[in-house]
Image (tube, rainbow, N blue to C red):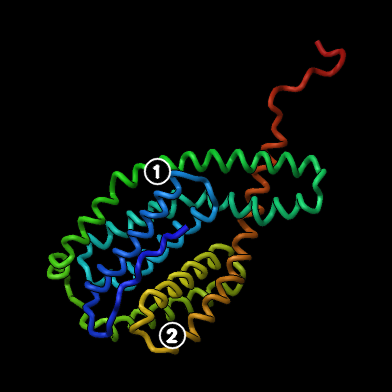
Amino acid sequence: MTTNAKSPTLHRKTRPADAFAALIQASLARIEACLDQLRHRDEPEDLHALRVAVRHARAVLWALGPSLPRQERDRWKQDLRMVARATSEVRDWDVFLAETIAPARKLQPDDTVLAAIADTARERRNTARDTMQAALASYRDWPLPALHRDLAHLAHLATRARKDGGRLGPYARKRVRRGRKQLRALTRAARHGDARAIHKQRIAGKRLRYVIEALMPVLPSRYTKGLHRKLVKGQTKLGSFVDGIVARRLMADCLEAQAMPDEAPPPPPGAS
């Protein structure tokens, strides 16, 4: 599947609002390609590609959104968050089935409990996908057209902005430094192993990683090489931890479903 739009050409003297328009246009093209693919087939990697495209768009919005008026920026946040939330449950089930259930069944192919859990997980996943597809169909009708409308009038939006942000080169470095500062604070908060704190740390790390990837042409090599490599390595470790938490929750859901009888058991012998 090809969902990658052509990456825009950025220069250090580019205005942040213009860079936002170029990068978001590419992100929307990827998002729409993924949405179209999901309409025609059911493949976990298609959903993953959509979620990555949305993450890139949200990272660009975080990095360059301050160059836009607050009203439009807040609406973009809400609209992109809508897609991320609509896809999260199906993705959780996909990962659970692929990385927990499939390896377990390979080791114990004749285990009837595992087979029942797998059936329940697939049923839950398919139900979640139906709900997701309805939400994504609604998203195509609105607000996706509104996002395109914003891009068409971005020059007007930029003139209304509180500040233009100057040139992209120094602006990008400033935003990356801010992202690093936030990530350090969240990393300290997550040292005691609190699941929510670790989840926030993981999100901040992903965002900074995608910001660096988007703004790579105008960033110094210390960001585009060393820091990016460190972020990718850290995300792998945090991802395994968070996926384990989600897997335990989904396993508990499946076991609870297995424990609930489809109908009331027959009364014991001699009962009136």
Nearer to the camera, 197 or 80: 80
The picture quadrant where one finds residue 270 is top right
- How many residues crowd mark 1 within 10 Å: few (<14), some (14–19), many (20+)? some
Q: Position of residue 57 (x, y in %)?
A: 36, 64
Dot 1 amino acid type: Ala
Q: Position of residue 191 (x, y in %)?
A: 59, 74
- What residue is shown at x 43% (from left), y 44% (from top)? 39
Q: Is residue 196 left or right of residue 211?
A: right
- What residue is shown at x 57% (from left), y 75% (from top)? 234
Q: Is residue 104 left or right of residue 178?
A: right
Dot 2 amino acid type: Tyr
Q: Pointer 2: what residue?
A: 223
Mark 2: which secondary structure? helix
Looking at the rendered structure, the number of numbered marks drawn on it comes to 2
Q: CA distance from mark 2 to mark 1?
A: 37 Å
Q: Pointer 1: what residue?
A: 135
Nearer to the camera, 87 or 29: 29
The picture quadrant where one finds residue 117 is top right
Mark before the other along the chain sequence, 2 or 1: 1
Q: Position of residue 171 (x, y in %)?
A: 28, 82
